[in-house]
Amino acid sequence: MTYERVFFFGDSITLGCNDSSRLGWPGRLCRAQDRQVAAYNLGVNGDTSADIAARWRAEALARSRNSPGLYVFAFGFNDAARPDGGSTQVELDASLAHARAILGGARELSAVLWIGPTPLDERVAPQSTDSGCWDLRNAEISRYDAAYAGLARELAIDYLPLFTDLSREPRYLRALADNDGVHPADDGYAVIAERVGAWAAWQRAWLP
């Protein structure tokens, strides 16, 4: 089945923070396709699974116009962060509960794809921001990624694990080093778009 709309929910990586083209990976991904579709980038800087659980349904339904849409979710990066060196922002069990609710609810409406979190350049960790000190480590992201993959298998939802692949991808690592170490420079978003575009689950949901 093909879809007239695709909704991308996520955090600043989905939004495309620091991408000079302002497309992020969702915009690059859809631009590379050979047909027109209404693509909604609903990424929000700093969002966790809890934030997405609270907003995704209203935002999607406001844009659906009773037409079928493909739901693409990408989160976990911010869940695994430790504000001021304390506990993770969203503990893993709670993150999995949010994911179960999000994906189960979205699947009642239409097709769902789930994309795992990306790595960072740990040379920038911890980071000091206006809101405090944030510590994020690849080992923590990997733990969430593995748990998400297990939940996806349980729910029979297609999941694309990017973490290990991008941790070994020189282009992505260079793009992180060329930017702030958390968000990739332009070519890093291109790498993500290429990975998603080559994913069989995306192709099945996209191609006629």
Image (cartoon, rainbow, N blue to C red):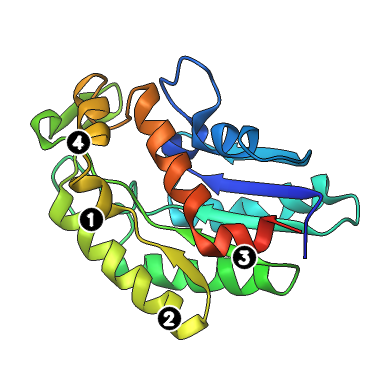
Comes first in the chain, label 1 or label 3: 3
Classify 199 as above or below 167.
below
Point out the frontmost of discs 1 and 3. 1
Q: CA distance from mark 1 to mark 3?
A: 22 Å
The residue lying at 48 percent from left, 52 percent from top is 198
Q: CA distance from mark 1 to mark 2?
A: 18 Å
Please, what is the three-letter code of the amino acid marked with disc 2? Arg
Residue type of the residue flagged with mark 3: Val
**Amino acid under label 4?**
Pro
Q: Which residue is mark 2?
A: 153
Mark 3 crowdedness (10 Å alpha carbons): few <14, some 14-19, many ≥20? many
Q: Secondary structure at mark 1?
A: helix
Q: Which residue is mark 1?
A: 164
Could you tell me how far apart the alpha carbons at marks 1 and 4 are, in whole angstroms? Answer: 12 Å
Q: What residue sits right under mark 4 in the picture?
A: 170
Q: Are marks 1 and 2 in contact (CB under 8 Å)?
A: no
Q: Residue at x 35, y 78 (%)?
A: 150
Image coordinates for residue 173, horizontal then vertical, percent:
20, 34
Q: Quadrant of the C terminus?
A: bottom right
Residue at point 43% right, 50% down? Answer: 48
